[in-house]
Image (tube, rainbow, N blue to C red):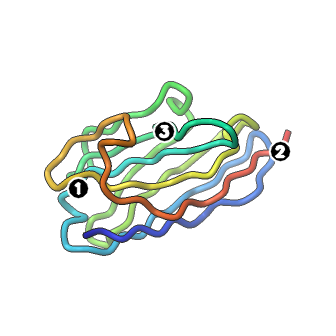
Amino acid sequence: QVQLVESGGGLVQAGGSLRLSCAASGRTFSRSPMGWFRQAPGKEREFVAGVGWNGGSISYADSAKGRFTTSRDNAKNMVFLQMNSLKPEDTAVYYCAAGPRWGVVVFTTAGYDYWGQGTQVTVSS
């Protein structure tokens, strides 16, 4: 099993930056692809970014390309999402998720087995 805890959310003005962290526990973390998703009120949860188990195979949603960067540190069981040039439409609860061992990054929630509790990101205009 993998347990995930997100942190780093908060209130920021448009154009600002936040760095989200996801602390993972569990023996299979270092062999699991990790994804970042977000869910705004009244909307479905959507893929933001993902990183393969070895730090490669990084993917971004079109809305995140050029502004967000994801990375992981397997030695510390951590995954990160650096968000720059934030916009009001980025406001949402952000979740990290772990996929199956030796799996690949996918863009759907069904491809992930474990989820954190989420962290709120609010971008004011």
Q: Residue 28 location, x and y as percent? A: 19, 66
Q: Quadrant of the C terminus?
A: top right
- Secondary structure of residue under mark 2: strand
Kindly give the residue lying farthest to the left in the view shown. 102
* Left or right relative to 28: residue 59: right
Amino acid at the residue labelled 1:
Ser
**Mark sitting earlier along the chain (2/1):** 1
Query: Which mark identifies residue 124?
Result: 2
Q: Dot 1 corresponds to which residue?
A: 32
* Residue tagged 3: 48
Relative to the observer, which residue lies in front, 84 or 27? 27
Residue at x-position 38% and y-position 47%: 35
Residue 75 point in image, percent of width and height: 26, 71
Horizontal side, residue 62 vs residue 51: left or right: right
Q: Are marks 1 and 3 in contact (CB under 8 Å)?
A: no
Q: Amino acid at mark 3?
A: Val
Quote the CA–CA distance across marks 1 and 3.
17 Å
On screen, 37 above or below 67?
below
Identity of the residue drawn at 33% across and 39% down: 58
Mark pair 2, 3: CA separation:
20 Å
Q: Is residue 10 left or right of residue 68?
A: right
- Tag 1, which secondary structure? loop
In this orientation, which residue lies closer to the viewer: 13 or 103?
103
Is residue 122 toward the left or the right of residue 8 in the image? Answer: right
Mark 3: few, some, or many residues within 10 Å (few <14, many ≥20)?
Answer: many
In the rendered image, the quadrant that contains the N terminus is bottom left
Picture quadrant of residue 4: bottom left
Give how far across and how far down residue 5 sits, in percent.
47, 69
